[in-house]
Image: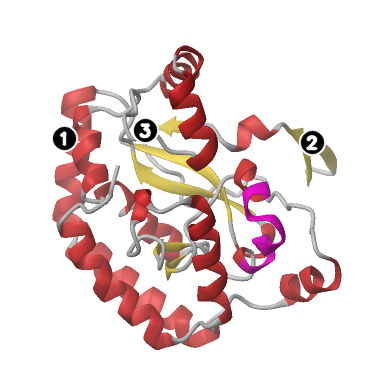
Amino acid sequence: MTVQFQADHRTHEIPPERLTLETDVTRPRFDDRSLPRVRVPARSGMRASRMRRQSPIGGAIKRALDVSMALSGLVSLSPLFILTALLIKLTDRGPIFYRHIRLGHGRRSFACVKFRTMVSHADEVLEQHLRSSPDAAAEWAASRKLKNDPRITPVGTVLRKLSIDELPQLINVLRGEMSMVGPRPIVFDEVPLYGTDIDFYFSARPGLTGVWQVSGRSDAAYSKRVALDRRYVENWSLWTDLVVVLKTVPVVLTARSAY
């Protein structure tokens, strides 16, 4: 399926693979106005139309909490940011950050920023690995993750275990593209895996952490992840967000079910 978008009074087409490949950059461009806003077609009639018109769940209260926590995190964790950047640069000499196109509230795309944890030619490595290993191909098709991923660098393994690679997403939170708590950001080809429940995902901002992350993380089946996202949106409360944030701390510190 090819996605179309409007830019500079012209219609452009983006094949699905361009929405799922990681793009390495030396530094993230946090104000990249040239990035296309991709809209995914609705799947469930009037319900989808109503949800697209809604503001993200939580409204102004959730947004205020997001901004205050993101600012506090960026200030307090700045030494860790510097140390991580040095480790990546000195051990791999490649780009420090990468931007990955994800889908968020209102069916819009955004550049999700992370510390780079993979080799620079990750796409080629993945393609070759999936061709040579049927078991890996099946695992990738089922969960979009690999327990033994050949693309990940030694430093990247540690960053992923401790979820440090996701800290630059605090910038996405400040920009209003993500929330501190919400569904895990998805790529375009994960949309069919949600079925009609995709409308619940698109009614919230994706989260830096969420119910799925504190309920088994990579060990949880994808169907469970979809069910948890729907339940979170349907039953959102400020108390739920605070509980998820508190539960995230021990999950990260123990590196439980992370890869």
Q: Residues within 10 Å of mark 2 (few under 14, many from 20)?
A: few
* Most common SS among magenta residues: helix
- Residue at position x 25%, y 27% in the image: 153
Q: Which mark is residue 237?
A: none
Residues drawn in magenta: 192-200
**Could you tell me the amino acid type at mark 3?**
Thr
- The magenta stretch spans residue 199: yes
Query: Quadrant location of the N terminus?
Result: top right
Q: Quarter of the image containing the C terminus?
A: top left
Instruction: Name the element at disc 3.
Output: loop
Q: Which residue is mark 2?
A: 12
Report the Cα–Cα distance between label 1 and label 3.
14 Å
Residue 73 percent across, percent down from the top left = 25, 66
Q: Seen in the image, is 216 located left or right of residue 48?
A: left
Sequence-first disc among 2 and 3: 2
Where is residue 88? Give x, y as percent: 22, 33
Q: Is residue 250 left or right of residue 165?
A: left
The residue that label 1 is drawn on is 87
Residue at the disc numbered 3: 26
Q: Nearer the viewer, residue 101 or 231?
A: 231
